[in-house]
Amino acid sequence: MMRFIRMTRVLPALLLCLSTSAQSSKSPASRPNIIMFVVDDMGWQDCSVPFWTEATPLNRRYRTPGMERLAAEGARMTRAYASSVCTPSRVSMITGMNPTRHHVVNWTSPFRDRNTDGPDSEMQPAVWNHNGMSPVAGVPGTVHATPLPALLNEAGYQTIHVGKAHWGSSGTPGSNPLALGFQVNIAGHSAGHPQSYRSEDNYGNVPMKPTIQAVPDLQAYHGTGTFLTEALTKEALRSLEAPIRNGQPFFLHLSHYAVHTPIMSDPRYLQRYLDMGLDSTEAAYATLVEGMDKSVGDLLDFLKAKGADRNTIIFFMSDNGGLSLQGLRGGQPHTHNLPLRAGKGSLYEGGIRNPMLIRWPGVIKPGSAVEIPVSVEDLFPTILDMAGIKQPKIIQTVDGKNLVPLLSGRVKDLGERPFFWHFPVKWTSQDGPAINFFSAVSLGDWKLIVSLRTGKKELYNIRKDIGETQDLAGQYPDKARELSVLLGERLKQMKTPMPGFKSTGRPVPYPHE
């Protein structure tokens, strides 16, 4: 029955594909398979693969042989960025737009027209696209854009989504992966985290007590002792059988709910981390990481066994920095991404720098490291080029840069360009480091962070001070001014939503005003 239900959901995706158009220079049979492996809330340090100049104590804590294997076969992107929370990154990934343009600046509620911003005594949050992304025009509170899977679908790809979606609120087209151009959707809907990782809880599908966070489509695994990450992996591999057998290129978006809260231990790995002396929360978190990593290894093994490994490109990335809030993680708050400062929700490096690996057999030098800064919106034009899709007909203006010349070695860098972050809302009641009402811009080695509440500006040289410990705004006022103008003009040009002051009813001035 479960298989029949999935196939009946194919029609909306096919109808969407009729409305998009792209020219391709490759026949379907010659195009590479492409896998986007996305992890939720995984920090830059949550693995045994070092993304810095040296391995750290946190790298030595985690066991991730799958990621090590992926790094050995591809490239580590040591300065890869995303937004500080999930939905803005996910929208950027499939549209190529930066949040300053698409205006989805916070995570979207699974309920339509429900703003996720927390109350604040001083600040009025910005009016943003709180319903997320939509492939259909005219949906209130959304950004209208042509999604990546629709373009790949039209070019002959079998497009498959497995796991967390979270592109839009329920009741809007963006909440359904099939409306975005995926031909297969397994377990993706409007919620941003699972009700439970345990099959004993039916992944949250408790009889007579349904919740919006209950993970759908996995009834076959209910009560079987199969951890959610494992169930999603099994379904992802099963979904690849047909396109591989038929010689059809595929695009798999395998988006794990791990390692997002609720932090629940995967019993297969727990004792190892308890024996290391970790508290129960941190031990459970480490098991989520290791279970996710097993998925990487299983995927690589499957591709090799099927003879599909040499023609498959794999992207690995988290959607934001690692969680570091007090009460949700063990140990001391805001230490979970060291040497990076802070974590999820913050515009310091711990909240926006992410582990990224790219494996492209025959093109990327195995075991290489790329120090050039890149961002999540770059994946949209990069994947289109890899798929041979030239001059796609899309609605939106793309901010991302094509990484293919860099990855293929045709160029050594992409030229100096600015990167922008904007978080004009209240994400949490814990007013932590660069959390709630902040904007930031990075250019070359320099990064400016602006408090929208107080107007205070902080300037850091990221290459020399990765931990953002030395504020240089007073020492280099001209550089601070230069970046303030760059950030302010971008926000003004894009009509990016700004918060306001309750005391005056006026909006926050742009950073350069």
Image: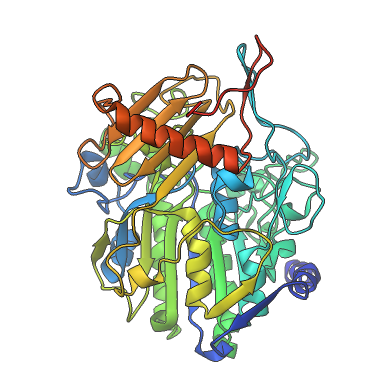
Pick the residue in front: 463 or 188: 463
Q: Is residue 112 visible?
A: yes
In percent of width and height, residue 505 lies at 69, 15
Single out the residue that lies furthest toward the left: 54
Residue at the (63%, 43%) spot, across then down: 104
Question: Looking at the image, is 255 positioned above or below residue 160?
Answer: above
Question: Looking at the image, is 434 positioned above or below residue 22?
Answer: above
Q: Is residue 87 visible?
A: no
- Image quadrant in which you'd find residue 14: bottom right
Residue at the (56%, 72%) spot, across then down: 251
Question: Looking at the image, is 233 positioned above or below residue 335?
Answer: below
In percent of width and height, residue 291 lies at 42, 53
In percent of width and height, residue 319 lies at 49, 48
- Image quadrant in which you'd find residue 122: top right
Residue at the (34%, 42%) spot, across then down: 271
In percent of width and height, residue 90 lies at 57, 51
Pick the residue in front: 265 or 466: 466
Question: Looking at the image, is 124 positioned above or below residue 163?
Answer: above
